Image (cartoon, coloured by chain):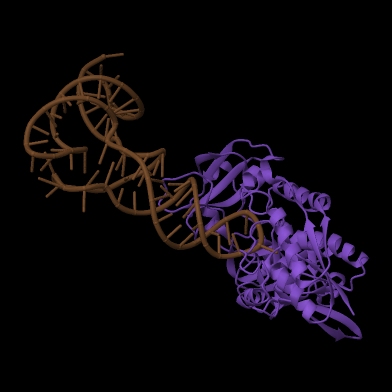
Amino acid sequence: MKRVVVGLSGGVDSSVAAYLLKEQGYDVIGLFMKNWHDDTVTISDECPWLDDSNDALLVAEKLGIPFQTVDLSEEYKERIVDYMFNEYERGRTPNPDVLCNREIKFDVFMKIALSLGADYVATGHYCRKETIHKEGKEVHRLLAGKDPNKDQSYFLCQLSQEQLAKTLFPVGELLKPEVREIAANQDLITADKKDSQGLCFIGKVRLPEFLQQKLQPKQGKIIEILSSEEKYHQLVPDFDSKKEKLEFLSSKYKYDINDGKVVGQHQGAHYYTKGQRKGLAVGGTPEPLFVIETDVDANVIYTGQGKNHPGLYRKALFITNDEVHWVREDLRLQVDQEIEVMARIRYRQPLEKATLYQVDSGMYVVFENNQSAITEGQFVAWYLDSELVGSGVIS
RNA sequence: UGACCUGUGAUGUAAUGGUAGCAUUCAAGACUUUGACUCUUGGUGUAAAGGUUCAAAUCCUUUCAGGUCAU
């Protein structure tokens, strides 16, 4: 009998995952990860992880499977929280949950599971895995969850073949309502529990307060750039090479403090991200202001009026070579190769048509349509049909 | 310190003497396992004091504040 360790989070999805595996005849062990115990920065009610761990325990008892708790908060702090601070400090916007999957759930946690004699690790993610044989080797495909509304493949976009090989996603073929129904039928305590939100393991946080632990506030200017600004209306020049054109399309607009007028003050440029609307505290404009650029060195935030402000849009982005990740290593592009894919630059964004171009220093992703708020530090994930084949950090 | 103009929520602006409205900001909720976006709902105001009038943001007087012209 194959042994599977399920990461029980105390939510309905992992509860049902555990149940399904048991039904399928696996030797199932439930393992709860405790990754955070500092309540001071969370918004939600007291001690969410205590409730979660209790719910996980009750589910395990109900299913009659062994249950354990592991404390990974040290690793979580080193690999996720510190990464967050570093990224924000550099003026980028990290995606901690993508990292959490790569570094914690499917690395630290997986190793613990394997040390318990597990053949597989399972989670409650809404995505699917399929294993095919190609040139005599096993190749694992990471497929979108069947529920289009809950597909979580994006958060797993940094997983490797090695990690996928030892992974099961039992709820990926189900729709969320079906999962809830199974939980209800099995009388699992998590059946009606609200979906988790916010940073996994930490919960909803007030980001500025959270970041203030490490990043000191400092007052700076908020500048408004008019959409009539001349740099938006330059003609696209002729290019000598494709590479030059790609470089042009993916280049950011560069702003200077004299390009617009000062409309307000902020308490630190690194608390803001591109595309952000709330939190600027600047009113009086006919249309809302959106952040179009942050400059953490000069501590200046550039904003533009309205959702359609040209400063918000770009057609292409670049990923440096060491941040290009192929889930499907066998599909990796060689220099000068290109491929048409569907891509997204944030969770739950509809897939957009794009073309990948590999050059010697990295890879360009050129979208058919201009994309709003392409943000450095976030992940772009690309798909062929419903298969996530690769991802990278936006530079 | 001679003459003129303007004062409406946090901000920008509407209202022939007749229910102070809109947008933004802000807040709460919904959505969401990042950060965001989006959606719904909500809050605050006529610079001050008098006067005319059934009725004043609106007309008159004074005060205060800001701005403009000034041989």
Of A374 and A30, nearer the camera is A30
Name the side, left or right, on which B15 lies relative to A293.
left
Task: Relative to A173, say whether B51 is above or below.
Answer: above
Of A100 and A186, nearer the camera is A186
Q: Colour of chain A?
A: purple
- Image coords of residue A272 (percent x, y): 61, 48
- Image coords of residue A338 (percent x, y): 74, 75
Of A316 and A207, nearer the camera is A207
Q: Quadrant of the N terminus of chain A?
A: bottom right
- Image coords of residue A392 (percent x, y): 75, 64
Q: Quadrant of the C terminus of chain A?
A: bottom right
Count of all numbered marks drawn on residues in the image? 0
Q: Quadrant of residue A66?
A: bottom right
Q: Residue at x 60, y 72 (%)?
A: A350
Of A371 and A10, nearer the camera is A10
- Image coords of residue A247 (percent x, y): 69, 62
Task: Relative to A384, say whether A218 is above or below.
Answer: above
Q: Residue at x 69, y 46 (%)?
A: A39
The answer to whether any part of residue A121 appears in the image is yes
Name the side, left or right, on which A256 lies relative to A360.
left
Q: Residue at x 67, y 40 (%)?
A: A212
Q: Quadrant of residue A188?
A: bottom right
The answer to whether any part of residue A361 appears in the image is no
Q: Quadrant of residue A125?
A: bottom right
Instruction: State which chain is coloured brown.
Output: B
